[in-house]
Amino acid sequence: MMESGQMRENENYFDSDIDLREIYNVLKMTRKLIFKIITIFAILSTAYSLILTDYYKSEALLLARSSSETQGGLSQYSGLAAIAGLSLPSAGEDKAAQTIELIKSRNFVRHLLTFDDILPSIMAAKSYDRDSKEILFDQKLYNSESKTWIRKPINNRIIPSYLEAHEHYIENMLSIYKDDETGFISIHIEHISPIFAKNFLDLIIQETNELLRRKDMEESMQGLEYLTSELSKTPFIEMKESINALIESQLETQMMTKINQDYILKEIEPPFIPEEASRPNRILIIILSSILGGLLSVFFVLIRHYYFSGEEQ
């Protein structure tokens, strides 16, 4: 019994060895065909990669100021501030998270679209002229000479809505995240124009600071009006001292909004004009396509060999 089992194992091994040799011989005999197929895939993938549009990524490294930097640390007066209708920042308030959500918000995109040429550059850019350094627009969507939209209406709108622009902005252009260890905020903008990518990222940082500065300024002015009015009404010395402290904090906030150009976001590494495209990775496309062509060609010659061999038998 043991001898018969050993003989079967030897026969299986022998059959397996014969199959591997046969496969090797088949591949050896058809190596020219395999090479031709791989070459065809490489040529086609090269041609395909060359017609793809280049995209450029501008990046910036930022740091969000803490609440204590933009407003005084007056948590002991938070109760009185609440009565006055003011919102003093808590120690644990995360300015970075608030700023990131603002940059990603629909209202922020709607604000950005009020600037010239931002909407067509987001929604109708087709290619980039390296010589003139200008964006070439899709003439089926937008007439750059008359600056009018001529696309087919979507949801009864010829001009793209801010919601359409926001969707494209989030899915295809913006990348932003915070490093929890360092607290740094990395933000990227990708576009077919390297110059627009840099300028648009500059605009995002500038308007983020401006909107947050304006918001804090308006709130502090409203707070000062109320506190000044209440100061003249209260007869209690301790209450007067608390109100004076709150007035001082609001004056400090106004001072910070006026002296800091980078009110919330401080630039560690400012945006730049990228020199090399971030995508597509043409070499990777060619390599993967060639590998795919090699695998398909091997499968093809093996299936053809065994199929026709089976028919002859």
Image (spheres, rainbow, N blue to C red):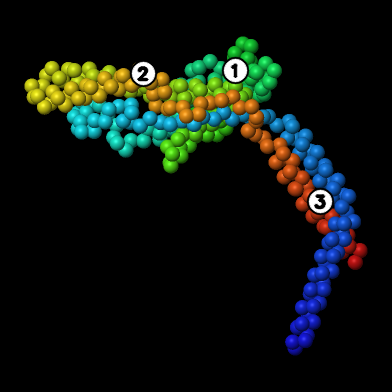
Identified at 77% across, 82% down, the residue is: 6
Counting residues from the N terminus, which is met first, the one under dot 1 or under dot 2?
1
**Disc 1/disc 2 C-alpha distance (Å):** 41 Å
Split into 4 quadrants, where in the image is the N terminus? bottom right
Viewer-closest of 58 and 216? 58
Label 3 is placed on what type of residue? Ser
User: Residue 29 location, x and y as percent?
Assistant: 90, 56
Q: Is mark 1 on a helix, strand or loop?
A: strand
Counting residues from the N terminus, which is met first, the one under dot 1 or under dot 3?
1
Q: Mark 2 points at which residue?
A: 259
Q: Mark 1 points at which residue?
A: 149
Viewer-closest of 162 and 207? 207
User: Residue 25 location, x and y as percent?
Assistant: 87, 61
Which of label 2 and label 3 is nearer to you? 2
Identified at 61% across, 11% down, the residue is: 146
Q: Name the residue under label 3.
A: 297
Left or right: where does residue 132 sit relative to residue 250? right
Label 1 is placed on what type of residue? Trp
Residue 7 appears in the rendering? yes
Answer few, some or many: residues within 10 Å of disc 3's Cα (few below 14, many 20 plus, some between 14 and 19). many
Identified at 67% across, 16% down, the residue is: 132
Of the numbered discs in the image, which one, if any, rests on residue 271?
none
**Disc 2/disc 3 C-alpha distance (Å):** 68 Å
Answer few, some or many: residues within 10 Å of disc 1's Cα (few below 14, many 20 plus, some between 14 and 19). some
